[in-house]
Amino acid sequence: MKNAERKNKTLGDYISCGRHEFVAFVKNRNSPQSSNHGTIGNNLGRIVMGVLVCERQSPNDNETKAKFFHKSQPVYDGDSNIFCGDFSYDAEIVSEVPLSLLTSFYSGNWLKAFSREFHEAKQLLKKYGIY
């Protein structure tokens, strides 16, 4: 089979339901073109390591998004140093070991410092030695 004919598996091919946590590398498909990410001239784009949380209710649950938490420099006062982004289960699996994904984030934001979400995300990242 030629490379052009081969279709990589997606996150949805592996995660049908339940809660799962993974340390993963994620590349945002849009980052090489975005001057906001400082990746102009970098064909690798912006690849970050963090914790992927999947909480899919069923194999047909296409509404639930996978959440990805990673450390990042805050932009605005009041933001923490943890960024949370979400994307769908059609994220492409680039590598299984270590887990590496290629996707486009639907939304993302820095968690507010001292919020409940920040403390929960901090504990999650600490659990895997990333914080």
Image: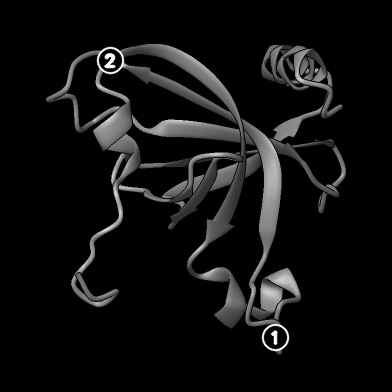
Quadrant position of residue 7: bottom left
The spot of residue 128 in percent (x, y) is: 76, 20
Mark 1 lies on a secondary structure that is: loop
Neighbours of disc 2 within 10 Å: few (<14), some (14-19), many (20+): some
Q: Reply above or below: 92 against 31.
A: above
The spot of residue 108 in percent (x, y) is: 56, 45
- The chosen color scheme is one colour
The spot of residue 59 in percent (x, y) is: 16, 22
Q: Is residue 99 left or right of residue 113?
A: left
Q: Can residue 83 be seen in the rendering of this structure? A: no
Amino acid type of the residue that numbered disc 1 sits on in the rendered structure: Ile
Q: Reply above or below: 10 against 75.
A: above
Q: Which residue is mark 2?
A: 17
Of residue 128 and residue 57, the one placed in the foreground of this image is 128
Of residue 112 and residue 33, the one placed in the foreground of this image is 33
Residue extending furthest left?
60
Q: Which residue is mark 1?
A: 40
Q: Residue at x 42, y 11 (%)?
A: 19
Residues at marks 2 and 1, CA–CA distance in whole angstroms? 38 Å
Q: Residue at x 68, y 80 (%)?
A: 35
Q: Reply above or below: 122 against 97.
A: above
Q: Residue at x 19, y 15 (%)?
A: 58
Q: Is residue 68 left or right of residue 71?
A: left
- Closest to the camera, between mark 2 and mark 1, is 2
Mark sitting earlier along the chain (2/1)? 2
Quadrant of the image for the N terminus?
A: bottom left
Amino acid type of the residue that numbered disc 2 sits on in the rendered structure: Cys
Q: Can residue 81 be seen in the rendering of this structure? A: yes
Of residue 56 and residue 85, the one placed in the foreground of this image is 56
